Every structure is written in structure tokens, then in C-alpha cells.
Image: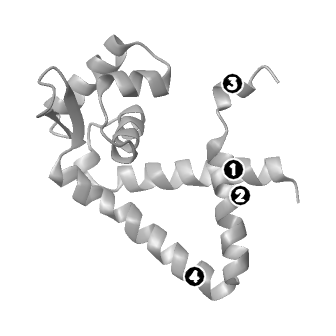
Amino acid sequence: MGIVKEINNFYYHMALYELQVMNGNDYYNGLSYNSLLYINVIEQMKECTVSKMADVLKITKSAVTLKINELVKQGVVVKKQSEKDKRVYYLELSPHITQVLGVYDQVFYKIERELKGKYSQEQLELFGDVLKTISGYEWRNMQDD
């Protein structure tokens, strides 16, 4: 088994399945794959702001602002003003897009059930550790290695 080959295969299928779900859902009409990536970042990031997104994505705040404003106009993202600091706006997903994203959770719960039926708890914990390790790599910083 070649690990690189399997990681590439996994990544390919995740992207393919995500695009299939995106294309099969009317609510995603008009949203680009790039928009979906922003949505995923907002969903996972705690107290998400334009500045935090720019730092994580390693792009300019103005580029993030342009994309966020587009997503706000599309009704996908909501800006909520901080109660502590009125200059800060947190980025949240609209209730409707949150509901749409529930499709992914359903798929992942099904996968979890099937994996629990096939593998031991110890194997699943090892798999979880491997996923954490893979997701912990900063790809951009590894390009020079």
C-alpha cells in the first residue's frame, strides 16, 4: 500500500463527493467550489472574523472581505457584531446553509457506524490519530522540503 497514493485517492473522492452533493442541491446553485471552501472554514473556525480567515488562508484581508461580502449577498454568511468590541464582526453561516450542511454530517455519521462495525475501537482510535496528524500538516510550509 502506498500512503501517498491512498491519500491522493481519499482527497480525490472527498472533492468529488463534495462537488456531487453541491451539484445535487438546489441551494448551492450559484456557489462556486471556492465559496464552499470558505463556508467550510467559517463552519469550523471558532469566533471567525475576516482577519482570522486572512491569517489562516494566508491571503489579504481585502481578498477575504470581497469574498465574504459576496457570500453575505447570497444569504450564505451573516455578520454579527461583537458585544464586547463593536469594531469586530464575527462571521457565521446562515441558518439555512447550516441546515444544508447537515447532509455532510449525515454522511459522516453513516461512515462512522459502518467503520465501528468493521474495525476495533483500538483501530478506530489509531485511524483518528492518523487523521489528526495529516490534518495538522501545513501544506504551504512543506512545499520547500
Which is nearer the N-term, disc 3 or disc 1?
1
The residue wearing badge 4 is: 114
x and y, in percent, of residue 130 in the image: 71, 58
97 w.r.t. 78: above or below: below
Which label is found at residue 133? 1
List the residue tagged with mark 3.
Answer: 141
Of badges 4 and 2, nearer the viewer stands: 2
Left/right of residue 46 with respect to residue 111 in the rendered view: left
Residue 131 is left or right of residue 111, and the answer is right
Disc 1 residue type?
A: Thr
Residue under label 2, please give it: 130
Residue under the image location 37 percent in, 35 percent down: 38
Quadrant housing the C terminus: top right
Spatial separation of the CA atoms under disc 3 and disc 1: 15 Å
Q: CA distance from mark 2 to mark 3?
A: 19 Å
For residue 65, above or below residue 123: above
Helix, strand or loop under label 3: helix
Q: Amino acid at mark 3?
A: Asn
Residue 14 rendering spot, x and y as whole percentages: 56, 53
Mark 3 → mark 4, Cα distance in angstroms: 35 Å
Q: Earlier in the sequence, mark 3 or mark 4?
A: 4
Contact? badges 1 and 2 (CB < 8 Å): yes
Above or below for 74 versus 98: above
Helix, strand or loop at disc 2? helix
Three-letter amino acid code of the residue under disc 2: Val
